[in-house]
Amino acid sequence: MTYDAIERSQQDGIAASLFLIEYGDTDDSYFAYTDADQPITHDGKTYLPTTIGRDKIESAGNSLDNTTLKIDITPNASIVTLFRGRLPSHQIRMTIYQGHPEDPDADYKVVWTGRIISVARKTRFAQIAAEPVSTSMKRTGLRRHYQYGCPWALYGAECKANKAAARVNPLAAALGKNYIDFEPGWFNDLPVEKFIGGYVQWTDNETGILQTRTILTMNGSQRVILNGDVFGLDVGEQVNAYLGCNHQLSDCEFLHHNVVNFGGQPWIPKDNPTKLTNQFY
């Protein structure tokens, strides 16, 4: 039976909402909730029943479609823990489906998609604030320009640098609010200064979520200064550290051996090809 047939039925149209919250890059980095009274399996994921409710979704074809959607959820939900006293490392994406548990075809429709921007604790519940995907679509996006440097995100789909070859696995020797100290020689003969602009990752031992922090600078050869707080990590635990890149031809060729995927234009002439001098500069 189709979604429309059940929706129009006078006795079968009891709808259920599915909330898929994705917080990382791996296949298992998600939370799945439903406001139904029983678990629902959809697209290979099991949505667990919990106390959750949302604002009414309206679409008027104007700027009101970009208003923030608020969702109330039980305060002990995993998504609330993710925001408790910290900021997540990744963008938190959310998709809301609506369908009917009695539908044998499990025909659940997407009714809303966007990202979570905050989670606030209230007296008896937590409130999620989310903005629709249409908000980001109206922002000015990145534009590709002719440039000397490479515009690709390091280790991204266009860069294709070998991430495994650029990784070392040191143990944390000491921790601070925004730094990690490693044992001497942790960089395995790689140029230690080239880890600036790279990042470190570790598994949060409180939530099991992969945390990521960019390496801003080095203090000596053992201390890496990060762009965020360090939490969910204990001394002696393993950290994955990845080389950075200056996005110039030199690092792409000699550090990452990835010059075939270099995205810049290093041969742009610096002199005016039509005359020897320019009266303006």
Image (cartoon, grey):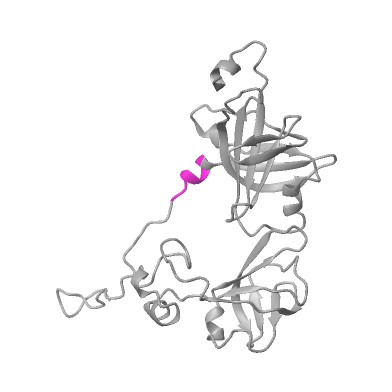
Instruction: Indicate whether residue 234 is drawn in magenta.
Output: no
How far across and how far down the image is residue 256, in percent?
44, 77
Q: Quadrant of the N terminus?
A: top right
Image: 213 above or below 69: below
Residue closest to the eye, 65 or 200: 200
Quick check: 73 left or right of 115? right
Q: Which residue occupies the extreme front position in the image?
A: 104
Residue 150 image point, x, y percent: 39, 69
Q: Which of 264 and 243 lies nearest the eye of the viewer? A: 243
Residue at 59% in and 28% down: 106
Q: Residue at x 48, y 67 (%)?
A: 155
Q: Is residue 12 above or below residue 214?
A: above
Q: Position of residue 212 (x, y in %)?
A: 63, 65
Q: Where, quadrant-wise, is the C terminus in this rendering?
A: bottom left
Locate residue 105 relative to residue 250 in the image: left or right. Answer: right
Q: Residue at x 53, y 86 (%)?
A: 191
In this picture, residue 71 sits left or right of residue 280: right
In the rendered structure, which segment of residues is drawn in magenta? 134-140
